[in-house]
Image (tube, rainbow, N blue to C red):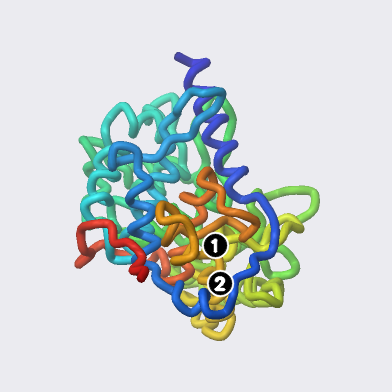
Amino acid sequence: MVVRRSRHRLLALLCGVLAALTLTTPAVAAPERAALTRPEAAGGWLARQLVDGERFEAVFDGVAYPDQGLTLDAVFAFAATGVADDHGGDALAWVTRPDIRDGYLGDGVSEAYAGATAKLALAVQVRGGDPADVGGVDLIARLRSLQTPAGRFSDRSAYGDYSNAFSQSFALLALDRTAGGAPPAAAAWLAGTRCPDGGYPLLPAQPVCTSDVDATALAAQALRAADRPADAAAGLRWLVSVQRADGGFANAGGTPNANSTGLAAQALRDGHRLPAWARARAFLAGLQVGCAGAPADRGAVDFDGGGFDPATAPRATAQAVLGLTGIGYARLSAAGADPGAPALACP
């Protein structure tokens, strides 16, 4: 059991790392681009990719493992686009199933993972549920128990602490929606990780502070929610400074892609940087598969424009629609979303 759990955790971490990587500039004809700014079609395509209509999986060496993180990204995407509400409900029901939930969060005693706990709590809130009672588990109490005296939310695990800027940011966003609010010490800790250039690193306390597009996008949203607008503004200024000429964003010296651009665009719209958001949104629209694409791919958002890859498209689409709609995590809600998985209307 220990070996399986450790392997699953490492595989989940690998999925997150791979999702942040790579590479090439899209080339899309102008007539096609104008027809592609349709987040609802992207949400519909994403819904049709769910395994058994309820989940995503990661496959390694021919073995399928549950991918709770990507499934929750889809829940957020459905709320942002206002479609596939039935799929969003089924996906959240799958993630909160005790065996699936505990494999993602840990058992809460010997194993408890801050980022996963916070992300699931936020997804429950987005769908109008009570994160204090998720199958008998109080996610809010568990999350608060993982806050250290310094303010950092850390994993409790025999396999090491994998908490990072995403863990801290999701924790602030989830707790901000509770009566107790986001802990000031936790917001101060995140603000204190800021690099000299104004961006935020994925991992704190590194020999060289290196700003990360994805981490900064999420941190800026969390700090705005936690009433630290000046700290958020520093991150937003850094994002604008590293936006590429084509409107896209990239991490680690790569070329612009849908994942980083989607998160950055969401933060820019949330932070009222509207011209930069408009450029990023246009870049994302140029990556969306239109009527010239294969029928099964229409509506999806390609990772980098280098050729449609069905392996990377679900995560790229889930994160891209956050930027296309520009609805920040703090305001995200599934209330009023429609059921069904709409398809791109083509002649």
Q: Are marks 1 and 2 in contact (CB under 8 Å)?
A: yes
Residue type at mark 1 is Ala
| Marks 1 and 2, the one that precedes in the sequence | 1
- Could you tell me which residue is drawn at 73 percent across and 57 percent down? 254
User: What label does residue 219 carry, if any?
Assistant: 1
Residue 195: x and y, percent? 71, 63
Q: Residue at x 57, y 30 (%)?
A: 10
The reply, left or right, for residue 256 in relation to residue 95 is right
Q: Residues within 10 Å of mark 2 (few under 14, many from 20)?
A: many
Residue type beneath disc 2? Ala
Q: Nearer the viewer, residue 338 or 201?
A: 338
Is residue 172 visible in the rendered structure shown here? no
Q: Nearer the viewer, residue 131 or 298?
A: 298
Residue at which label 2 appears: 232
Residue 159 at least partly seen = yes
Could you say which disc has been placed on residue 59 in the image? none
Residue 4 is situated, as x and y percent measured from the top left of the image, at 49, 18
